[in-house]
Amino acid sequence: MYKELLLPVVCVLLFLIAGCAVNPVTGEEELMFYPEHDDITIGRKYAPEVEKQMKGRIANHTLQSYIDTVGQKIARVCHRPDLEYHFVALNHESLNALALPGGYIFITRGMLQKLTTEAQLAAILAHEVVHVVARDTSAALSRMHAMNLLVAGLALGRTPGGAVRMAELTRIFLVLRYSREDEKEADLNGLDYMVRAGYNPRGMVETMQILQKENTARPIEFFSTHPSPRNRLEYITEKIQTNWFRLEGLTVGKDAYQNAIAQNLKDSKRKKAS
């Protein structure tokens, strides 16, 4: 009985001690259970499990190198270029992308198959980079833990049965929902990152239109963790029209994307089948 009473008390005390952290993107304070140095530890620990649950990496070095190159262009101009970023394409057929704390960003085969330009790829990677920089996953986990009085050991796998707990938390990462403000922040700052990296911001509009079209045919996984693009298109388009009057010279990269992605996706699928 005393143990049952003690756990909630300990959890509440831990959250009181945790306090707040400043969001590097907005400059505002928010509830944060995890110290910043834990982000890299969590990302490194859970990235292999995410890959495992999402059918592993696409076995094509050229494709992986291309995605990483685009991602690193975004990373160099973000609010936290000092972090070590990892951009990985996964073999899952779902339309999805996600970020883990500490700079681990994933995009699925299904999503890559629907995109048509490098600027569209940059839009998705930029959106996820903002989630990393703003520590949105750690903040969302902090809110979730505060509501459910989960112990910190669950997140870091330090309790008995750690392997089971790791699988459980990985599933949480895969379906974790950010707030609408987090998503809007990721969209708008993602636009800034894209342009700084030399990409045409219309790529984000086109990506939203692709996803909206796909979602009308069938519910897609991306919207289990991201809100529908219907309302997002309005403020994205407004920012582009307000901030960038001329888009000439900014990269669209249709041919580059097709050359790097389309054929290599087919090749990797043939290798897997054989």
Image: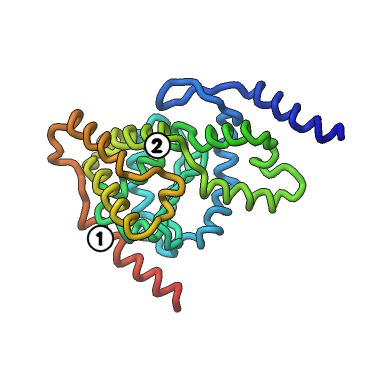
Amino acid under label 2?
Glu
In the shown orientation, is residue 107 left or right of residue 35?
left
The quadrant of the picture occupied by the C terminus is: bottom left
Rendered location of residue 133, percent (x, y): 44, 33
Q: Is any part of residue 152 visible from this angle?
A: no
**Image quarter of residue 229:** top left
Q: Position of residue 108 (x, y in %)?
A: 42, 57
244 or 257: nearer the viewer: 244
> How far, Cα to Cα, is label 2 from label 1?
28 Å
Amino acid type, label 1: Gln
Position of residue 4 measured from the top left corner of the image (x, y, whole percent) = 81, 35
| Quarter of the N terminus within the rendering | top right
* Color theme of the render: rainbow
Number of residues whose C-alpha sits closer than 10 Å to that of mark 2, classed few (under 14), some (14–19) or many (20 or more)? many
User: Which residue is identified by label 1?
Assistant: 258
Q: Which mark is residue 183?
A: 2
Query: In the image shown, does 165 or 68 lie closer to the viewer?
Result: 165
Q: Residue furthest bottom?
A: 274
Question: Which one is nearer the viewer's eye here, 148 or 198?
Answer: 148
In the displayed structure, would residue 266 be above or below residue 144?
below
- Looking at the image, residue 172 sits to the left or right of residue 219; the answer is right
Question: What label sits on residue 29 in the rendered view?
Answer: none
Please determine whether, in this image, residue 38 is positioned above or below residue 267: above
Q: Residue at x 24, y 48 (%)?
A: 206
In the rendered picture of this protein, how many numbered marks are placed on residues?
2
* Horizontal and vertical percent position of residue 119: 26, 47
Classify 10 Å Cα crowding around label 1: few (below 14), some (14-19), many (20 and above): some
Residue 222 falls left or right of residue 170: left
User: Is residue 27 depicted above or below 57 in this figure?
Assistant: above
Q: Quadrant of residue 92?
A: bottom left
Q: Residue at x 77, y 47 (%)?
A: 160
First in sequence, mark 2 or 1: give its number: 2
